[in-house]
Amino acid sequence: MATARKDDIVVDRGKWEWSEMWKKEDWWAIWLGALVLIVGALIFLPRPPADMDAKLAKAEATMAKESERAPFQTIEWHQANDSMSGLRARSEPHGKVIAKWLETPSKWKDNPIASIYMSEENAAAKREAAAPKFEAAKEKTAATLAQAKAAQESAAAANFQSKELNDQAETAIGEWRSAKSAESKAKTAASVQSYNRIPYLIGLMVILMLFFSIGTPFMGIKTSGFIAGFWFVFLLAVVSEIIGGQATLSEYGFGSIIWAILGGMLISNTVGTPNFIKPALQTEYFIKTGLVLLGAEILFSKIVAIGIPGMFVAWVVTPTVLTLTYLFGQKVLKMESKTLNITVSADMSVCGVSAAIATAAACRAKREELTIAIGLSMLFTAVMMIALPTFIVSVGMHPVLGGAWIGGTIDSTGAVVAAGAFLGQTGMFVAATIKMIQNILIGVIAFGVAVYWCTKVDCAPGQQVSKMEIWYRFPKFVLGFIAASIVFSMIVNVMGSAGDVMIDQGILRGLSRPLREWFFILAFASIGLSSNFREMAHHFKGGKPAILYVCGQSLNLALTLLAAYVMFFLVFPEITAGLME
Amino acid sequence: MTTGAGASCERVAEGKGKTLRGWMQLGLGVAALWLLTFVVLPLGQRLPVVEPVMQAIVKADIKATQYWYTQSEETAYSAMYIRHTLDGMERRRQ
């Protein structure tokens, strides 16, 4: 049985009823999430890129041979690595069609129309303007490749025994890689095509409206009311995507989510949210369905990507910081709301927005609490994205250490990559990989928080909770979230390298992820449209959430730096040396 | 004391005033967003501490707004590169 409290949080209590499986949004989130993943599997798995297995085998054999031949990564090694990472199921024609339908509005600088419409005339002008830079970049790549080849041949002639020649070859190869990367970016600018996203956005709105309507009659939501209001929520989502795509805002990391919340709040707290929209404000329904899809993206094979040091930095320091920050909030700051405390602690210590969403849903935090956590995360992420790499470079910190520090402390992936890029290629690679490993942790955190809340927080002091009671109270969508993670992790593991191509770069990045992004933005538009400033101010009383964030982040910075130094320089210095090759 | 009709008129006038105030507040909110986007934040980008990082972001064309690893192309490439690098290192050691 479910009872609704006045703050709109559904609390499970009483006995299990099978009808919950079609009456509650937790289960509908699982069914709809599973539907998306099954459809994705049916689309992508039977259509691998041509000669995928042969290409993967050839690339792996080349990399193995080159690793044995030379003490550094040769030109052939890089070419094989590029060919492997270029293999993507979503780059096949069916993947491109899906991408066209699910694409969010493009980046723009001065004219917002450019995010959804570009005429052929404008596209041609952009191509023409970018062409000279592309030609110059191509020439530079060719020249640096020739130099790299010559340097590598000299090193090979000395049987790779001369340190000086090896170093010269490595430097020349590094220059070629930088030139190639610049050429790739210049090529993107020089191949701009005209587009009109409006018909696709309208089509997507209808698809999503019908998709979410499936569950409404079973959950007691008036379907006609949901449909009547959905277009407005979708429109706000699109407008937020357009605002979040503005170049300056995007460079600071202020993405669409914060604009969906602020935009919605601005409407609801000024002119008021019109009544006809209210049946479509199904925050939990959208967010939980998105979280089930997010579960599929939690691939456990990723945690070994950078070996034991990475696992230690991400999987030992992060839970330690999370626990200590939560305890600090309870014991020192004496925060009234435990759900706000854990949501802010998780978003600060794990991975920002996504961790806040997963944790808030697992402990049933109020929407205003989730909003506060996300707002704090975005604000401090923007500050840290600038301050941390500036400090690292100014003190001359080693890029592997700096990268690990950035990856373990800055909240969102995009900001981590941006800050890492300031340290150079190796720093960025380490930062991005550590962040990815930390992202995977949210599966465990969300599950742990859900269990802890069922067994400890949501009961009277001293009350013993039976196993069945835990089951009644447990947020069931978490089961879908965990199941999706386990199933997809196992499939990727069994498939080996092909798993990256077909699952990660196919079903997940080709269908599930873009849909999940839309589900979350719809959820945040709904949150904004149903929130009020007074309630928010009440939760922010005394600035405790901000104090919690700052204190927790300070601890995070200290512990992550210490752990990264110990693991990458004292315990596994050979890994650091290898990464610098 | 006001009559019933008078009170009703006052409520209508009050409602209209409230609506107008609401629209004005919405307009102010939009204006504040415009100011932030096109004046305050671009000025911030010129600060000596901020500028170098912003230039690196623009040069590398990084989307700093991504909040999850599968949204980032750089993450996929980085992880694969590091995995292959460590594999190669292991092979050389053997």
Image: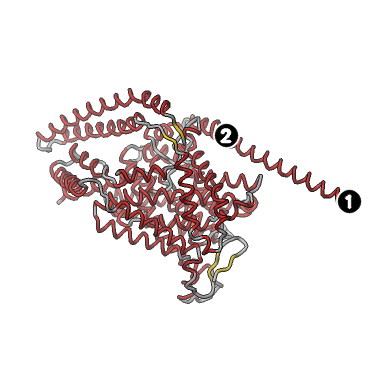
Residue A158, located in which quarter of the rendered image?
top left
Distance of mark 1 from mark 2, alpha carbons?
46 Å
Q: Position of residue B60 (x, y in %)?
A: 37, 34
Q: Mark 1 lies on which chain?
A: B
The residue where tag 2 is placed is: B34
Circle 2 Cα neighbour tier, 10 Å, few/some/many (<14 / 14–19 / ≥20):
few
Subunit of mark 2?
A: B
> Mark 1: which amino acid?
Thr
Q: Which residue is drawn at 33% across and 30% down?
A: A186
- x and y percentages locating residue A238 in the rendered image: 50, 43
Identify the disc placed on residue B3: 1
Does residue A295 lie above or below A379 as drawn?
Answer: below
Please state which of residues A581 and A226 is positioned toward the viewer in this rendering.
Answer: A226
Q: Where is residue A405 in the image (x, y as percent from the top left)?
A: 38, 46
Query: In the rendered picture of this protein, how many numbered marks are placed on residues?
Result: 2
* Residue in view at x 52 percent, y 41 percent: A239
Residue A7's spot in the image, x, y percent?
60, 60
Q: Which residue lies furthest to the right in this view?
A: B1
Question: Of helix, strand and loop, which one carries label 2?
Answer: helix
Q: In which quarter of the image is the N terminus of chain A?
A: bottom right
**Residues at marks 1 and 2 on the same chain:** yes
Q: Is mark 1 on a helix, strand or loop?
A: loop
